[in-house]
Each structure stands twice: as structure tokens, then as C-alpha cells.
Image: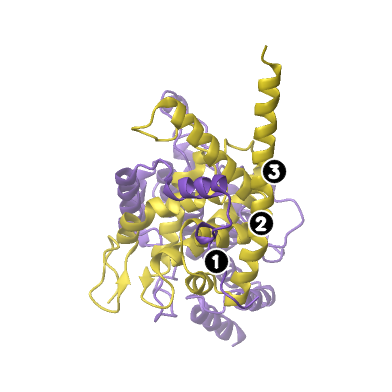
Chain colours: A yellow, B purple
Amino acid sequence: MKPNMQGGVSSMGGRIGAATLYRDHAPFIAGFLRRLGVPAADLEDAVQEVFVVAHRKGGYTEGPALPRTWLAAIALRVAQAGRRTRQRREAAASPMLDAVPDFRGNDPAAAIENRRRLDRVQRALDVLPLEQRAAFVLFEIEGESCESIAVALGVPLGTVYSRLHYARQHFLKAHEGLLDRERNRELRKLEAEP
Amino acid sequence: MTKPPLRLLDDPNVSSALRADLELSARHVPALDLSAGAARLEATLQAGAVPEAHPDEHAGPADGGVGGGTQGVLGTIKHAPWLLKVGLSALGVVSVAALGTGGFGRLPGLSTPLQHASRAPAPSAELAHEDSPADPALAPTPSAAPPASSPSHADAPAPAISTVQREIAQLVRIKALLERDPQAAYRLAQASLRELPEGTLREERAGLYVIAAFRSGDLEHARAQMQRFLERYPQSPLRDRLLALAAESAR
């Protein structure tokens, strides 16, 4: 039985249609795409593309890959294609983070601090090649297992380990560098104060 | 490296600053209008403009494996007005001349009047490896560029066109031309691959390119392109259809 046009769950074979996948996983995919460097301005279109492709593939079929990592593999390809298109267009880069992060309930100072920290993570992620970044985000931030990532990306488990190994090295170095720069800036500011 | 790595968040040696940053990042979700996004997706799926593949199906739909027919196209048009001009002109419902250049505004990336494609000479370029400049009339435009506003819609905001919407529009147009003007379909498919060499729906566009090549009568070229297509997309739903075309052309 194929998924219905609305992309609902079919009654056989553990298949999940695109609409259901969207409802359950769109926020995850949006976050994943942002961390892969998709600009905020392109985010909604990119999310749509992921689920349109998921529909074209017949929806998710129960198997070794989990729905989240299966969708993440599609999102990685969408991000890769989008990056090439953007490079061709030579468009100016969008701000890395959403202009107005949603930190309802926080005071403004905390919101600014949170934004700075998120920006730091994103900047450190930006130094990673896309495939390393995908593995890093899925494992370190989203808490997916290496086995699930390997199945979804269609690579051997050892490749995931290797990508994570190098991604972590580069990420830690970049993150530490950013922290140092911020500390130095703060120090200079303090020294400059009368 | 064979040992599963320890997550940074589980590593006691990780600095508190890094731990705090990663924890915050894990909690952060970008702003996304879920209900609007779900409605948009549903509209796209209901329109049927995106074919659905099934793991157990290798043959494409009877009409060629791409697109969802006029009903689907017109359904999509409700949600993407710029498709109206694409769909209607491609299907011959309304002539390009009747639409004019100012009626609906310039199409995103499909600004070429249909007549140019129809009278274009037989192509000879390789699949997605064309180095020569395209026919100026078919010159691609930036993939995400919104259509220029028309006088009648000067105040209306230009619709945001995603790459995949653009690809769908191109597929609709190429498919509609396949029967009545395969050479025009061929030219459009070629221009489409040149403009968006790695789009989400590249497989479908490349498949139609090969079909159009067969229909155009350039059989040697078509067979060579088919080989390349099948090497790249061995599981394509268009596989059987292409092989049938190749067998038919060999008779």
C-alpha cells in the first residue's frame, strides 16, 4: 500500500508519508539545515525540499535507518545542492543565525549572551567540511548513534568514526580560538576603561 | 578507528564553556512556521506535481514517469501563480503570444518564448557537460530570482521561487512538449540541466532529456546519453522506459 496523497502513514509495511514526517521532524530538519549552513532566508524552502524529496522517495520505510537520520541524509544533499547554487549566484552570505532568536522568557542580557554562544558554535561548525559537519551535528548535538548515521548516509561505520574524529579536532580548535578571541577582546575592553 | 567515540557532552574532560555551548545548541530550534509549512507541503503533494517513487516499483507511470498530469499541474498553479503561464503555454491552452510579455510577468528562468525553443536546431551537446554557451534565448537566469513584476501586478509581491519549484516548472514544460515538439523539449531539458546541474529533481530532468533525444531522432546521441544516465541512476524508475525506447530505435 502506498502512502496517501497527504503523506499519511500507510497501514502496511511501516511506511511514513511526507506530511507525517514533516509534522514530526520539521523542527529537527530546520535546525540541522541551519547548522549545515543554510541561510535563514532559504531555510523554509530548504525544509520543503527535504520533505518533497522524501515524498518522491515514497516516504520513509521502516529499516535500519531511523526516520530522523534518513531525513538528515536527504537534508545533507539538499544543503549541498543549495550551497552549490548559492556559490554560483555568488550571493552575499546571510547572517549565520536567525536575526531574532526566540528566547522568550529570558531577559535581554541572557538572550544576547545565548545568541553569542550559538553564534560561536555555528562559527566553529562552519570550518568543517559539510560531510564532517553533518556527522558531528547528528552525533554530538542531536545525539544520534553512529550506526544510524552510517546507515542513513550510506557509508561504513568506520567512515562515520573517522569523520567524527576529524570534525571534533577541527571543531574544538575553532571553538577554543573563538573563545580566546572573545576573552582577549574583553580584556582589552577592561584595560581601556579608566 | 574502530572504537565508538564518546560524545563530547559525555566526556568529563570537556570544558564547561564548550559543554554549555553544545547544550544550548542542542536545545535551539530555528523559527519555523510549522502550520504554514505543513499546508504548503500538503498543497504541493496534493497537486501531484512531484512524482512519488516506490521501492518496489521500477517502471515509471504510464505517461512517462514524471509529472502528475494536467489536473496536478493546475492544482499546483493555485499555490504558485507563476506556474499558470508555464503550464498553460506548455500545454497549448493559451498561446505565448496571447499571454504576451507583460501579462503575468517574466517567468523565473523560463523567460524564453516557446517559439524560440520550437524552431531551435537539433542539439548535439552532451548530457550536463555542455561547455558551449546556451542559445541566448534559453540563457538561464539565477535560479532563485523572482519573476519581474508585470504592469498588472506591479503592486503584488513577487513570489519566492525555490529551486525545486523551478525544477518542477521546467519538468512540466518539458513533459508537455515531448509529444508535440520533442526538439523543443530537448532544448529545454538541455537548458534546464545546464542551469541547475545538481538540482533535487535532476534525475527526472535528465531522464526527460534522454527521452527527448530519442524522440528527436538523434538516436546515436540518445543511446550514448542513455548509457550515461543509467550508469548514474541505475535504479531510475525511467530505466525500463528508456531501454524500451532504445530497443524500439534499434529496429
Q: Is residue B76 left or right of residue A36?
A: left
Residue B13, x across and y down, in percent: 58, 57
Q: CA distance from mark 2 to mark 3?
A: 18 Å
To which residue does mark 3 refer? A177
SS for dot 2:
loop
To which residue does mark 1 refer? B6
Q: Could you say which is closer to the camera, residue A180 or residue A108?
A: A180
Quadrant hosting residue A86: top right
In the rendered view, tell whether residue A132 sits above or below residue A84: below
The subunit letter for the residue under badge 3 reads A
Q: CA distance from mark 1 to mark 3?
A: 23 Å
Q: CA distance from mark 1 to mark 2?
A: 21 Å
Q: Amino acid at mark 3?
A: Gly
SS for dot 3:
helix
Q: Could you say which is closer to the camera, residue A136 or residue B22?
A: B22
In the rendered view, tell whether residue A31 sits above or below residue B218: above
Q: Which mark is residue A129?
A: 2
**Label 1 packing within 10 angstroms: few (<14), some (14-19), many (20+):** few
Q: Is residue A2 left or right of residue B18?
A: left
Q: Which mark is residue A53?
A: none
Residue A154, x across and y down, in percent: 55, 74
Q: Could you say which is closer to the camera, residue B173 or residue A56?
A: A56
Q: Which of pointers 2 and 3 lies earlier in the amino acid sequence? A: 2
Residue B89, x across and y down, in percent: 45, 48
Q: Is residue B68 left or right of residue B120?
A: left
Q: Amino acid at mark 2?
A: Pro
Can residue B154 be seen from the camera position used here? yes
Q: Amino acid at mark 1?
A: Leu
